[in-house]
Amino acid sequence: MRRLNFRYHRVLRAVLLGFLWWGALTTTVIAQDAATGPQNQAPPDKEDLSSAPAQVDVQPVAQDEEIRRRLLSVMEATGWFTNPQVQVQDGVVFLSGRAETDEIKKWAGDLARNTQDVAAVANRIELSQPSAWDFSGAWTGLSSLWRDFVRSLPFLVLALFILAFSVLAGWIAARTARKFLRRRVRGKLLRGVLAGGLGVFVFLAGAYIVLRVSGLTQLALTVVGGTGLVGLALGIAFRDITENFLASIFLSVQRPFETGDLVEIAGATGYVQQLNVRATVLMSLDGNLVQIPNATVYKTVLQNFTTNPNRRETFVVGIGYDDAIDKAQEVARKVLADHPAVLNDPEPWVLADDLGKATVNLRIYFWVNGKENSWLKVRSSVIRLVKRAFQLQGISMPDEAREVVFPRGIPVTLLDGIPEKTPSARQRQQPDAEPPSEELDAVATKAEAGLSSDAGELEQQARQAKPLDEGENLLRDAEQGRPPNVRE
């Protein structure tokens, strides 16, 4: 009975001590909060309250004063705190003062929490606000940068060495490729593009190795992938420029024309002066410089009159229905056969082409050496001589039939007797006398200024024109100083 009462008293005493401890703790906290006032009260976000311990000793071994002195001595010994203060009441530790960083504040709370017989920790340590003139953070950052720079010096030296080696290797690769392709690739522009592409590839490989050595593997992959994306974006943005550049490469390789060739491109006829990376330049027959984009040259129909120096010309002449067609054909054929600028091989033709309203139309075909003679002048000479021969042979060349309308009419008077015989068309068109001009029978008149080709005159006009500054002529072989494969 006495043992049971003793146990009962022990339990009752423990419960009373617990209530007393809780009351003392509550009273102390309320009193301290009232004493500090609202101005000195730490912000809720800066107070770190530890969780309740799993077990609280009823009779602690360490006293509050011993705990306070121990914690205060440790905090002062670190030198991390400004004006550190420690208060302990019934195992509850109250920390105050200032710390530089949140990690130091947390460290103080963990220190108090791990101290023997500490029931709870109220961490009221405030973080120090740096002064506006405090440059310690800047110096710390500079010091950190300097340390990082010193640590990265070996990698930097190695990266510079690899980068310099890649530049040199790219230059050597490009130069070697140019020498290797000089005899194997015809177009100089294509040789430059292939050699330059090889040099850039070698340099990018070196740059990739530099990034890998520096530990920037992800950046290296980004650069490699981004280069292709950037190239695709630039190709889309500058589609016309890219198209002209690629067309210039194809034209310089295929060589559909050479410098000085007479060509017709997109309706423009002239002598080729230059092929650059953007356009093809022609000297028109009127003496004007014409620039045609290379993309248009590559995609459009192109006629090269210099590839085959022989050029066929044609014109139509009408004779009367009363005239014999075979006679007119023979007269015209003889004129063509006797003309010095008309080629006998291929043979000229004189063909009946059409039956018109008032004439039988003959179409005359003949060939001219366009390299030696001007087809315009030869055509003019042939037309003039055929007309002259028809007149001398009495072959009529009537005008086209016309319908004449007289709105007010024409008075007609009938004559008495037999009307006078009206002359026939052949009789009306017979010349009274042959014109005594020797120039009419000449092959070339003064007005035609000879039959020679005018390519030399146009070349002289091109030299006198304003010089073009569009880049190098891709049709010229820099090694030989003349257009390659010149057509004789």
Image (cartoon, rainbow, N blue to C red):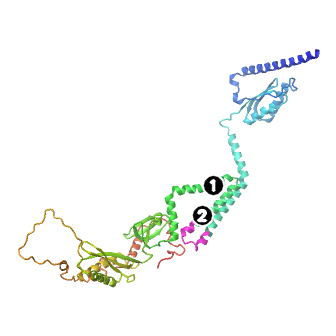
Tell me residue 85's x, y (percent): 77, 28
Considering the whole magenta stretch, tell me its main secondary structure.
helix
Residue at image position (54%, 57%) is 235
Tell me residue 353's x, y (percent): 31, 75
Disc 2: CA contacts within 10 A as few (<14), some (14-19) or many (>=20): some
In the depicted structure, whether residue 279 falls above or below residue 365? above
Q: Which residue is mark 1?
A: 223
Helix, strand or loop status at disc 2? helix
Residue 45, by quadrant, is: top right
Image-based side of 99 in relation to 15, left or right: left
Q: Is residue 191 magenta?
A: yes
Residue at image position (66%, 52%) is 219
Farthest residue to the right: give it.
2
Image-based side of 279 in relation to 435, left or right: right
In the depicted structure, whether residue 407 falls above or below residue 391? above
Residue 68, by quadrant, is: top right
Which contiguous range is marked in magenta?
A: 177-193
Marks 2 & 1, CB-CB < 8 Å contact: no
Image-based side of 311 in relation to 182, left or right: left
Q: Which mark is residue 197?
A: 2
Q: Amino acid at mark 1?
A: Val
Residue at image position (70%, 50%) is 149
Residue at image position (59%, 67%) is 195
